[in-house]
Amino acid sequence: MTDGGFESICSFVEDELEFATSHYNDSYLDRRISSRIRRTDSDGYDDYHELLAADPDEQEAILDSLSINVTGFFRNPDVWEGIREVLISLSQSPGSVHVWSAACADGRETYSISMLAQEEPRIDASDFYILGTDISPPALETARAGVYEQSRTTDIEGQLDFLDSPEEYVTQRDGAFHVTETARENVTFQRHDLINDEPKSGFDLVICRNLFIYIDPAYKAPILETLGRSLQSDGYLVIGKAETIPPELKSLFTVHDGRLRIYTLTADDPVRNAT
Ligand SMILES: C[S@@+](CC[C@H](N)C(=O)[O-])C[C@H]1O[C@@H](n2cnc3c(N)ncnc32)[C@H](O)[C@@H]1O
């Protein structure tokens, strides 16, 4: 195994397969590539590079493996109890509520927001508008369909235990879980690259979880600035439970619940005032 071999696989994936390996941290990339080396019985980086260059099926397999779309309904249920309280508080303010599920993978996080809003009696879900975005077109295709095959997903029933009446929001047929029309109301999906695309605007709550654990640390602060600029001045941000706000951005966000990683925008923060 040589570092040069690792680097040249990353360059091949970036240049030929158009997946921006330079945005991700090396240890993450190395874990994914080494796993493909083992699965294909290749003899190290150079041997695997040859296989990858010649085999379109392996090109698809490495892209699938790199797209880090691990997700679920109500992932970390304790965080969703915190999100419930935020949604209730937003629902009690005048006007409609706009929520952005950024880096939403296959949409289960996005639909979880909708299901929670529909089920919680203290929320008027008819006034909620929920947007899910991701960089990955195949993930968005699944999200828009709202159909999750049993064979490709683990324990969806367990994930839905968070709800009192999950059958209102997901039905099972033909070996798949189908998100119902009720849960799809007011939910839309769109492609958005958090590194290269512009911020959005007017969101009351942005949920962006489990992206920073994979991304190169250099992109973390710019992404968090993009998220901060997309919020209303009294908006909330939720990041992943294992993620942190970098020190240079601590003035932008005020801790609302430190354990659950829920923040609000700091009223007179310099980043927002610079826009
Ligand atoms: C681990 S999933 C997180 C899914 C969901 N937020 C959750 O916590 O369950 C990470 C997602 O980030 C997406 N992603 C990676 N780079 C991105 C970028 N630059 N902009 C937007 N999404 C990105 C991936 O396609 C993947 O679907």
Image: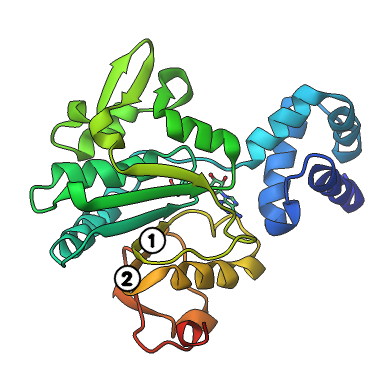
- Whether residue 111 sits left or right of residue 251 in the image: it is left
Residue depicted at 73% across the width and 45% down the height: 19
Is residue 3 or residue 165 the one in the foreground?
165
Q: In the picture shown, does residue 217 fall above or below 189? A: below
Residue of label 1: 206
Q: Are marks 1 and 2 in contact (CB under 8 Å)?
A: yes
Which picture quadrant has residue 50? top right
Is residue 128 or residue 60 the one in the foreground?
128
Q: In the picture shown, does residue 2 fall above or below 154? A: below
- Whether residue 133 sits left or right of residue 74 in the image: it is right
Residue depicted at 19% across the width and 47% down the height: 126
Furthest-front residue in this view: 95
Residue 12 position, x and y percent, is 85, 43
- Whether residue 142 sits left or right of residue 257 in the image: it is right
Q: In the picture shown, does residue 140 fall above or below 216? A: above
**Circle 2 — which element?**
strand
Residue of label 2: 235
Residue 241 visible, this angle: no
> Total number of numbered labels?
2
Crowding near the residue tagged with mark 1, few <14, some 14–19, many ≥20 C-alpha atoms within 10 Å = many
**Circle 1 — which element?**
strand
Which picture quadrant has residue 143? top left
